[in-house]
């Protein structure tokens, strides 16, 4: 295995791209452990991330079923809960502290383990080397470590579900003092310690992954693969990795200080606390400091979750509309804009936490600016569909669904981003609706789109499209039915993180709606069975996939059906054009892969191609995409 | 118990059956000969379903909105001055948001249906158009700028300083696990000193009054928040343990209570509880204070009734409340006022065990001698 990395080092020192000659095909060498478990092959690691992510998703979604039952039937006995949870649901009634634990762990699992690691870990790993034309990541070994850190972190997080005093229960944002004091809630005992340890490993994993992704994209692109010929997927993964590398360390520092407060008795976040009948010694700390540190990661984090999904949908929408993505450059520019702006809007989560109101004004301005690049992306997706020839593969369905969620969920950001309007909405179900649509649903759809689209490349077999459609319609409908009504509850002032709404007259009226939401959610969970069956069954028994099932342009489809370690048995293909030449006028097929040189393009009969200079010899520093499109416009 | 166990088993079974059905469906679809849908064209069906989703979904959401709108009375009657401003802006922004999302979703689903696959078609090669890009950068930018300006204005009004000469009602709200307590400054209009070091639940000093500070003797500690209508109210917000969030939903007021860092909120209630009852045609209506920052197991239950009334009623109510000194004397038999005046007068305490929680903290924090018994 290490030959591959050596190889890659070689390329950095020698002539940049000429390492094909050194390459050996590694497929078939190595034993079970080195091939499937401690593998350094990015494709295997990607699958490990995917499967771990799916398992974490099953647990995370399972937890939400349990607390949705509580919300729909407050005060009623549900025997199933007692069977599953034992002492946490005596007589079938969920314990209020454990309700909060479930909500907290649901958020943690879904945001970090499913949508961060599951999504980036799977697709950055799988697609970056394949799409930029590299034999593997810059460091296969660090890549392997990244997975095993993630795996360990997942195991610890799952173990924390079973500790005596219960798992962490202070919300996924674990604000101190609640998260710092076991006296305040039982989950802040051992459960929280495990949470923090697990997150530390998680951060390490995501830094190792991120550094690898960045290095690979910068250094290991194949001949001709200039930055303006990179697929938007790779652009998205690249920017996501940069955001992650810059922001995760700040979460680490937040967690570390919290650890100090908990274990060493320091007072970074704590001051003037009287709890459990006694005054604690903490003096001079500030809970607001924690919030600043947390959201400095937390807001970029929402884009860490979303950008890869947007990248995947760009690719899927373009391939299946048989049209170039509209506004390739604008897409890149808006992603760069989002990446940059995402670092200066964090305090919009803190308008009414006691932060200086003047700061609120500043952050309100930046926050509404970030809506502009988001809008550009949405419009560009829609224009890509215009006059396309849309094939509704399951992946395409999910990509279109993603755009719908992105719009519906993102638009409510302009209400929340307005500090004054945020006063009544903050910490209500309106926020829950907003981020579940724009972050939860949209990113989950990106994940699904990616799985349906690249399954043939991952496993060499096809998934069943019909089951894919059924899965799609179940999921699409249920997500809207679950999260859309939550806007109403939020407008009515119903608070998040409530064990039941019955204590307040103005919240109690939403009992029926709450039941409706729970039923819709169960409907949605059932739909996921179609996915699980389809996915696992077809890994083993699916129809053999064709080489390029979607007739796509990107490089991954030039590898053999089941590529070995090193990806291409022979030379790595050279790239001659951008990845979005679909339905190019005059060209015979409706797609034109990146690796086909100009002289080999098959034209329609009677078509006289003008051969731009650029296509004869690839020159990475130039910009073929722009030139090609400019003469269209004129 | 047996019946319950049975029910459990049936629930687990139900799930197993569903898995089974899922796999079966799959197998059925794979058997080409008995596949009832083999002639269906997935592009046509899915494209149509997308459009149908919108065409059905929109009216359904409208009907749902109308149906649920009587429960958003919260939105309809803002009960404070700034609340009316927030709501005006809220509704304007909401209209923009709804328009944009309906129109873009419509186009999205319409295009999905309109441009579904046709083997004789070739898609239009249309990689970019700078004019379009500029339009849809500029239009959102302008709309958002307008909204932001409005927002900044309203936000600044909410936080503007109260002029020296303006009359203002000062109240303090204290959060703890799990409940709210309000404090009024009493006749001297000044709050007495409090410190968490002085807290002693057992002798009724839950807010931690400094028992030597005379300014605190006439303070009122109450479990109900009363506000005079049309008077500017300044609420100081404190917490003694973890974060809470003082939320007065009907007044569009929300601010975290932060241990170690008092916060505040200024607002003017405009509708009395009685008028609101008439407006809502609900004689049982009450304004409520809730907590909206996760704070532990009782978070969902931190309720405090809020009453808005005429100034006379408000003053009358104030008079009926016990001062801290009165309350303390009744509970512990100690006359703080006399004590402060140097008189050592003791009466029989009406409750026992005042000492238990009277910890070293108090002495530590103040150097003060434990109270006379
Ligand atoms: C486009 C992708 C977006 C994602 C993934 C996203 C995600 C999130 C998440 C996860 C939260 C909840 C945090 C919490 O309270 O626990 C949130 C809240 C918020 N989002 Fe977004 N958001 C997006 C877009 C926007 C946009 C475009 C805006 C503004 C124009 C915005 C403004 C806000 C604000 C202000 C909050 C805080 C609301 C509150 O806590 O009261 N978001 N968002
Ligand atoms: Cu944010
Ligand atoms: Cu609370």
Image (spheres, coloured by chain):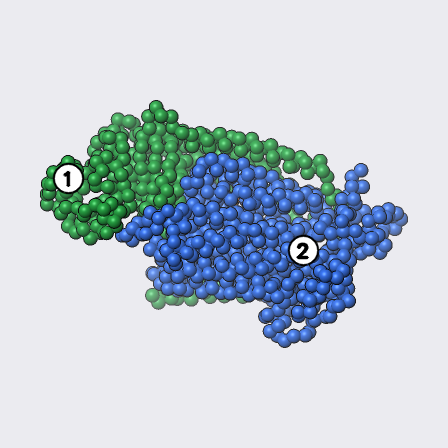
Chain colours: A blue, B green
- Front residue of this view, candidates A514 and A581: A581
Name the residue at 13% across, 38% down.
B342
- Spot occupied by residue A564 in the image (x, y as percentages of width and height): 69, 68
Query: Is there any visible trace of residue B180 in the rendered image?
Result: yes
Task: Output the chain of dot 2.
Answer: A
Residue carrying label 2: A217
Q: Residue furthest front?
A: B367
Q: Residue furthest top?
A: B165
Name the residue at 50% across, 40% down.
A416
Q: How many marks?
A: 2
Q: Is residue B48 left or right of residue A99?
A: right
Residue carrying label 1: B339
Query: Is there any visible trace of residue A558 in the rendered image?
Result: no
Label 1: element kind: helix
Name the residue at 34% across, 51% down.
A282
Q: Is residue A562 left or right of residue A433?
A: right
- Spot occupied by residue A443 in the image (x, y as percentages of width and height): 57, 52
Q: On the rendered image, what quadrant is the C terminus of chain A found in? A: top right
Q: CA–CA distance between discs 2 and 1? A: 77 Å
In front: mark 2 or mark 1?
A: 1
Name the residue at 67% across, 46% down.
A332
- Spot occupied by residue B201 in the image (x, y as percentages of width and height): 23, 48
Label 2: element kind: helix
- Spot occupied by residue A600 in the image (x, y as percentages of width and height): 84, 56
Q: On the rendered image, what quadrant is the N terminus of chain A found in? A: bottom right
- Front residue of this view, candidates B338 and B256: B338
């Amino acid at each position: 295995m290490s030959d591959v990395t050596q190889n890659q080092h070689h390329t950095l020192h020698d002539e940049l791209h000429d390492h094909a000659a050194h390459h050996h095909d590694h497929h078939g060498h190595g034993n079970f452990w080195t091939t499937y478990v401690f593998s350094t092959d990015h494709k295997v690691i990607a699958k490990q991330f995917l499967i771990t992510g799916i398992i974490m998703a099953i647990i995370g979604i399972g937890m939400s079923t349990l607390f949705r039952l509580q919300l729909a039937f407050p005060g009623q006995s549900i025997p199933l809960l007692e069977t599953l949870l034992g002492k946490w649901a005596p007589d079938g009634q969920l314990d209020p502290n454990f309700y909060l634990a479930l909500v907290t762990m649901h958020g943690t699992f879904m945001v970090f383990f499913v949508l961060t690691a599951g999504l980036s870990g799977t697709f950055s790993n799988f697609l970056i080397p394949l799409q930029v034309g590299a034999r593997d990541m810059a460091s296969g070994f660090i890549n392997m470590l990244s997975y095993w850190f993630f795996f360990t972190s997942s195991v610890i997080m799952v173990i924390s579900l079973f500790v005596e005093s219960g798992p962490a229960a202070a919300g996924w944002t674990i604000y101190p003092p609640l998260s710092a004091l076991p006296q305040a809630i039982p989950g802040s005992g051992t459960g929280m310690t495990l949470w923090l340890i697990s997150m530390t490993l998680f951060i390490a994993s995501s830094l190792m992954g991120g550094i690898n992704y960045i290095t690979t994209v910068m250094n290991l692109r194949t001949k001709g693969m200039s930055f303006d010929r990179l697929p938007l997927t790779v652009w998205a993964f690249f920017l996501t990795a940069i955001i992650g590398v810059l922001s995760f360390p700040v979460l680490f520092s937040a967690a570390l200080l919290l650890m100090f407060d908990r274990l060493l008795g320091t007072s970074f976040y704590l001051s003037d606390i009287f709890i459990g009948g006694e005054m604690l010694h903490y003096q001079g700390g500030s809970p607001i400091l924690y919030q600043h540190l947390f959201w400095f990661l937390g807001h970029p984090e929402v884009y860490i979750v979303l950008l890869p999904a947007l990248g995947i949908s760009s690719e899927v929408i373009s391939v299946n509309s048989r049209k170039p993505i509209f506004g390739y450059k604008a897409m890149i520019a808006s992603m760069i804009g989002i990446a940059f702006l995402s670092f200066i809007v964090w305090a919009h989560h803190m308008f009414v936490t006691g932060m200086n109101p003047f700061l609120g004004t500043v952050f309100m301005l930046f926050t509404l600016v970030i809506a502009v690049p988001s809008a550009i992306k949405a419009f560009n997706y829609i224009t890509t569909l215009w006059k396309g020839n849309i094939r509704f593969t399951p992946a395409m369905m999910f990509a279109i669904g993603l755009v719908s969620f992105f719009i519906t969920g993102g638009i409510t950001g302009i209400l929340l981003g307005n500090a004054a309007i945020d006063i009544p909405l903050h910490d209500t179900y309106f926020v829950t609706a907003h981020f579940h649509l724009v972050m939860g649903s949209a990113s989950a759809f990106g994940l699904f789109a990616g799985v349906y689209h690249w399954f043939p490349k991952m496993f060499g077999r096809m998934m069943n499209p019909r089951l894919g459609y059924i899965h799609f319609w179940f999921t699409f409908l249920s997500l809207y039915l679950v999260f859309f009504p939550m806007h109403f509850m939020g407008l009515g002032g119903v608070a998040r993180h409530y064990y039941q709404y019955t204590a307040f007259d103005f919240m109690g009226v939403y009992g029926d709606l709450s039941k409706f939401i729970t039923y819709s959610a169960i409907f949605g969970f059932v739909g996921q069975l179609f996915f699980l069956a389809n996915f696992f069954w077809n890994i083993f028994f699916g129809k053999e996939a064709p080489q390029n099932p979607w007739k796509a342009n990107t490089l991954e489809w030039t590898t053999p059906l089941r590529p070995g370690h090193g990806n291409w048995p022979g030379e790595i293909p050279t790239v001659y054009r951008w990845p979005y030449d679909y339905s190019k006028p005059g060209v015979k097929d409706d797609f034109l892969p990146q690796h086909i040189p100009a002289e080999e393009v098959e034209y329609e009969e009677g078509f006289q191609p003008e051969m731009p200079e650029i296509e004869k010899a690839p020159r990475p520093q130039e910009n073929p995409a722009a030139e090609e499109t400019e003469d269209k416009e004129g | 118990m047996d019946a319950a166990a049975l029910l459990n088993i049936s629930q687990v079974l139900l799930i197993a059956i569903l898995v089974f059905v899922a796999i079966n469906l799959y197998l059925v679809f794979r058997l080409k000969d008995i596949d009832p849908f083999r002639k269906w064209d997935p592009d046509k069906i899915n494209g149509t379903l997308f459009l149908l989703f919108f065409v059905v979904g929109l009216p359904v959401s409208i009907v749902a909105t109308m149906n649920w709108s009587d429960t958003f009375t919260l939105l309809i009657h803002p009960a404070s001055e700034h609340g009316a401003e927030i709501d005006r802006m809220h509704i304007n922004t909401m209209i923009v948001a709804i328009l944009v999302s309906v129109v873009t979703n419509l186009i999205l689903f319409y295009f999905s249906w309109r441009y579904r696959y046709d083997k004789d078609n070739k898609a239009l090669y249309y990689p970019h158009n700078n004019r379009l890009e500029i339009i849809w950068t500029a239009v959102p930018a302008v709309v958002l700028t307008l909204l932001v300006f409005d927002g900044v204005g309203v936000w600044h009004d909410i936080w503007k300083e109260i002029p020296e000469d303006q009359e203002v009602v000062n109240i303090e709200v204290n959060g703890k696990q799990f409940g709210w307590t309000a404090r009024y400054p009493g006749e001297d209009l000044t709050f007495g000193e409090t410190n968490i070091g002085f807290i002693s639940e057992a002798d009724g000093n839950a807010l931690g009054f400094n028992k030597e500070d005379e300014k605190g003797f006439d303070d009122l500690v109450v479990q109900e928040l009363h506000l005079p209508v049309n008077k500017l109210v300044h609420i100081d917000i404190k917490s003694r343990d973890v974060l809470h969030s003082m939320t007065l939903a009907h007044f569009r007021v929300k601010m975290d209570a932060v241990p170690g860092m008092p916060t505040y909120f200024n607002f003017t209630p405009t509708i009395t509880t009685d008028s609101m009852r008439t407006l809502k045609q609900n004689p049982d209506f009450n304004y409520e204070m809730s907590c909206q920052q996760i704070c532990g197991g009782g978070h969902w239950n931190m309720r405090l009734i809020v009453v808005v009334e005429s100034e006379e009623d408000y003053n009358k109510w104030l008079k009926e409340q016990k001062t801290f000194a009165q309350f303390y004397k009744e509970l512990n038999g100690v006359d703080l006022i006399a004590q402060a005046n140097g008189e050592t007068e003791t009466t029989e305490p009406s409750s026992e065990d005042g000492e238990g929680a009277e910890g070293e903290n108090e002495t530590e924090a103040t150097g003060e001698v434990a109270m006379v018994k």
